[in-house]
Image (cartoon, rainbow, N blue to C red):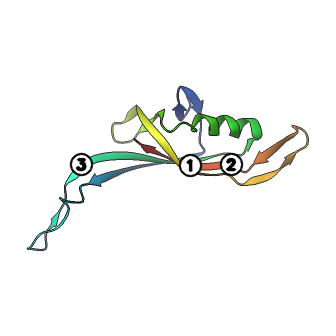
Amino acid sequence: MSVIKINGVDFSPSTLEYQRYDIESSDGSGMNADAETIRERIAVKVKLACTFPPMHDHQISSLLQAVDPLFFELEYPDAFIGSRKKIQAYVSDRSMPLYMFDDSQKEWLWEGISMTFIEK
């Protein structure tokens, strides 16, 4: 089974870091007159930091094209619910260092790619 699916297409990162974070209201969070913390949580979102193994041009291109739309469907193993979940997500910065030209494949080999998926 693949680790993640992007619009139904399987991808398997070498690492996946699951993060949950609170979105708080700027008006309803802070400190009160008694110096107690006040929090107004308006949403909880998921962020997945992924690193993918080395890839040739055609492989990395397929992954980059899958995350090119502004939003896309992402299926992943969700630690909070203990099963797979589908969300609408977007991708932040994508970093991919170039490694070398593979003469046997006649393609560039990339060291890998790292990207972070963020729930819409």
| Quadrant location, the N terminus | top right
Could you say whether the residue bearing mark 1 is in a helix, strand or loop? strand
Q: Are marks 2 and 3 in contact (CB under 8 Å)?
A: no
Q: Which residue is mark 2?
A: 112
Residue 102's spot in the image, x, y percent? 86, 44
Q: Which residue is mark 1?
A: 115
Residue 88's spot in the image, x, y percent? 42, 35
Which label was assigned to residue 42?
Answer: 3
The Cα atoms of the two marked residues, 2 and 1, are separated by: 10 Å
The Cα atoms of the two marked residues, 2 and 3, are separated by: 36 Å
The Cα atoms of the two marked residues, 1 and 3, are separated by: 26 Å
Q: Residue at x 30, y 46 (%)?
A: 44
Could you say whether the residue bearing mark 2 is in a helix, strand or loop? loop
1 vs 3, front mark = 3
Residue 109's spot in the image, x, y percent? 79, 46
Quadrant in which residue 119 is drawn: top left
Task: Compare marks 2 and 3 and give the one earlier in the sequence.
Answer: 3
Could you say whether the residue bearing mark 3 is in a helix, strand or loop? strand
The single residue placed furthest to the right in the displayed view is: 103
2 vs 3, front mark = 3
| Dot 2 alpha-carbon crowd within 10 angstroms: few under 14, some 14 to 19, many 20 or more | some
Q: Amino acid at mark 1?
A: Met
